[in-house]
Image: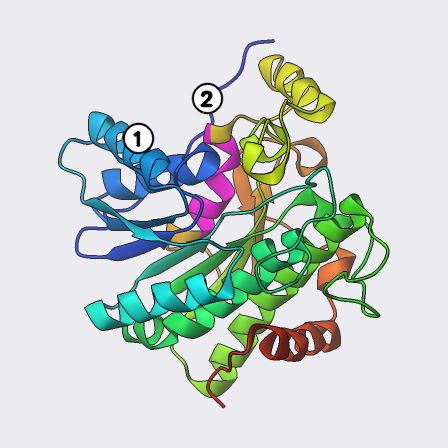
């Protein structure tokens, strides 16, 4: 099946500073490349410096004049998140775009962060929640747009309110959905609280549909030595045009972060059948993301678990 080119126009971003998590490969690398190509200075917080340097080389091969740099970040450690916050606040530069893109999906065993939280919840949601809190002065100074990347899995299952840190019986798929529902609710609640408190930032959420990214591929760092059957199937679907590619799957986040038409508190995803692939656009909130009461509840839980606080 021939694939029609799917893309968007990114406005000129000269003079802006963008921070993108998970930018050393996959969708995050494509996001960083597009932002840098539009003139933004891009900071890439990474766990693996060698992998990050390879990513920077790839960006500069496409955009030789790109301004990109690495900072250290391990999203499985709240101390590391706090250290990045300290580093960037010491640099004192307003942030104009923050794309919370990094994530981990269904490790083969029940794994935990350095702080004792289930790895997916701790990495996908709680660490990014804490990162926004630590960067709040810089985000406010830049009147930033914060875009948080969730997943089609947020349209399945529910939040584990009885055990949000998943310390008890474990189900990797349900825990992944739990992390992404929590993260989506956070992104929407961030907009509500910013508007009510006059914080000056805007927040929206996005999802990539389905594409062959590294989430289900071999990931030695989470104990996965080979590709899963799931990612093999998605690669086949992508090749025949029934799923996205890493280049197209990042477009909803890119649009949500940079388009003058992207709305605060809105949800962006692929516009093809079942929102699996296709050009980016606004879509209705999934049922799991509609409750403002749930959003406020997970916010309060997350402040306690992450040991951070936001402006009153």
Q: Secondary structure at mark 1?
A: helix
Residue 242 in sight here: no
Task: Give the left or right position of residue 227, taking residue 130 as reference.
Answer: right
How crowded is the residue under tag 2: few (<14 C-alpha within 10 Å), some, or many (20+)? few
Dot 1: few (<14), some (14–19), or many (≥20) neighbours within 10 Å? Answer: few
Q: Which residue is mark 1?
A: 54
Task: Report x, y in % for residue 266.
Answer: 56, 60
The disc at residue 5 is 2
The residue that appears at 45% across and 68% down in the rendered structure is: 132
Residue placed most toward the observer, 196 or 261: 196
Label drawn at residue 86: none
**Picture quadrant where residue 289 is located:** bottom right
For the N terminus, the image quarter is top right
The label nearer to you, 1 versus 2, is: 1
Magenta region, residue range: 247-256
Q: Is residue 254 on the magenta stretch?
A: yes
Q: Relative to residue 26, is residue 201 depicted above or below? A: below
Which residue lies at the image location 68% right of the left edge and 72% below the top edge? 298
Q: Is residue 199 visible?
A: yes
Q: Is residue 239 above or below residue 277?
A: above
For residue 80, what is the image quadrant?
bottom left
Q: Position of residue 202 (x, y in %)?
A: 44, 68
Q: Is residue 183 left or right of residue 139?
A: right
Could you tell me which residue is drawn at 60 percent across and 57 percent down? 113
Look at the numbered disc 2 and give the secondary structure of its residue.
Answer: loop
Q: Residue furthest left?
A: 65
């Amino acid at each position: 099946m021939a694939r029609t080119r799917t893309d968007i126009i990114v406005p000129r971003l000269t003079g802006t500073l963008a921070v993108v998590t998970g930018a050393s490969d996959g969708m995050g690398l494509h996001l960083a490349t597009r932002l840098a190509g539009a003139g933004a200075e891009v900071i890439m917080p990474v766990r693996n410096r060698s992998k990050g340097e390879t990513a920077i080389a790839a960006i500069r091969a496409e955009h030789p004049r790109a301004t990109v740099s690495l900072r250290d970040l391990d999203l499985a450690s709240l101390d590391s998140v706090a250290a990045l916050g300290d580093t960037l606040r010491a640099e004192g530069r307003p942030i104009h775009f923050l794309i919370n893109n990094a994530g981990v999906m269904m490790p083969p065993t029940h794994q935990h962060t350095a702080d004792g939280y289930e790895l997916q919840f701790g990495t996908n949601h709680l660490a990014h929640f804490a990162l926004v809190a630590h960067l709040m002065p810089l985000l406010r100074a830049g009147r930033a747009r914060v875009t948080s990347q969730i997943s089609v899995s947020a349209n399945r299952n529910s939040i584990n309110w009885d055990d949000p840190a998943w310390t008890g019986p474990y189900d990797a798929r349900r825990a992944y959905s739990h992390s992404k529902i929590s993260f989506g609710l956070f992104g929407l609640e961030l907009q509500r609280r910013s508007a009510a408190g006059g914080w000056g930032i805007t927040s929206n959420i996005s999802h990539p549909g389905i594409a062959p990214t590294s989430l289900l591929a071999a990931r030695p760092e989470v104990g996965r030595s080979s590709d899963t059957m799931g990612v093999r199937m998605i690669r086949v679907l992508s090749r025949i045009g029934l799923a996205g590619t890493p280049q197209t799957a990042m477009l909803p986040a890119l649009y949500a972060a940079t388009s003058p038409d992207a709305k605060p508190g809105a949800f962006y995803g692929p516009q093809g059948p079942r929102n699996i692939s296709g050009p980016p656009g606004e879509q209705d909130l999934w049922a799991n993301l509609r409750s403002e009461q749930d959003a406020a509840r997970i916010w309060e839980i997350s402040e306690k678990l992450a040991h951070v606080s936001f402006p009153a």
